[in-house]
Amino acid sequence: MPDVVITVEHNPVITFGRTGSREHLLASPTDLRREGIRVFEVERGGDVTYHGPGQLVVYPIVDLREHGRDVKGFVRRLENATIATLADLGIGAERRDGYPGVWVSDRKAASIGVYVSSWVTRHGLALNVSVNPAHFALIRPCGLSVEMVSIRDLLGRKVLLDRVRDMLLERLTERFGWALEASNLGEILGGARE
Amino acid sequence: MKSKVIEIRLPDLGEVEEVRVVQWLREIGSTVVEDEDLLEVETEKTTFVVPAPVGGRLTEVVAVGGATVRRGGVLGRIEQPG
């Protein structure tokens, strides 16, 4: 099976990783119901995360045996592709040792959480394009007192999610040496069964 | 015939120096096959599932949940029938 990259914009959802602490969920059940936010436990690394409208989520399903079995290198490529995309938009961003994700000064523009089984990656990265800031206030992201920020707030204008997606896919393609072919989920799953 | 004991070591994950053991997916005494998922380790928001280096019986867990293990460190042992 070739590498597959899935891009998606989720409905509002809060997920806990393996080391997630319920104390980092600041929203009450009433808040969650009112905002239509569902809560799930997932097997990725990391703590609590919010996904929702205005956030570009990228799930690269990559066989790391074909990429030097370098787990940290995989995360760094995701970070660097995101940093390059933000630079294309005129935003200076950086990675921080020990704090995965992409940062614009003290604020976090993209979160990363990866699960590797049989050397194949799951989960991936979430880049904030134009997320509702009130939804981020419902959690303590990754258990840290980290402020999240969207591209819209950094630029002071609206940017289309589809445009950011195309830019990020191009930067990822460069780094993973992919020859990208558009597909839909049905075709991919059909191909995997054959 | 004498059985052989094989060490389960933390594979080289690139530049990763140390990991924390999240949990074992198999119990002591269970029979495992080569490359089967054995335990989860975590480093900086990345969870990696360590596969069984060989098939056999999981006889020892050296690094329990919460333990920190350095690159190449011993996680447990598998006994192969002779």
Image: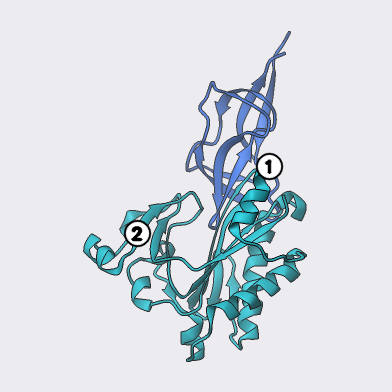
Which lettered chain is shown in cyan? A
Amino acid type, residue under disc 1 in the picture: Gly
Gap between marks 2 and 1, in whole Å? 40 Å
Examine the rendered structure and indicate whether residue A86 appears above or below residue A6.
below
Residue A52: quadrant of the picture: bottom left
Query: Which residue corresponds to the image point at 61% horizontal and 88% vertical from the top-left?
Result: A90
Q: Is residue A27 visible?
A: no
Q: Position of residue B49 (x, y in %)?
A: 59, 43
Q: Specify the quadrant that holds the C terminus of chain A.
A: top right
Residue A38 is marked as 2
Q: Position of residue A113 (x, y in %)?
A: 53, 59
Chain B tint as drawn: blue
Q: Disc 1 marks which residue?
A: B72
Which residue extends farthest left?
A: A30
Query: Which residue corresponds to the image point at 33% horizontal and 64% vertical from the top-left?
Result: A37
| Label 2: few (<14), some (14–19) or many (≥20) C-alpha neighbours in 10 Å | some
Q: Is residue A42 visible?
A: yes
Relative placement, left or right, of A20 versus A111 is left
Relative placement, left or right, of A14 versus A127 is left
Q: Position of residue A38 (x, y in %)?
A: 34, 59
Could you tell me if the residues under marks 2 and 1 are in contact, i.e. CB atoms within 8 Å? Answer: no
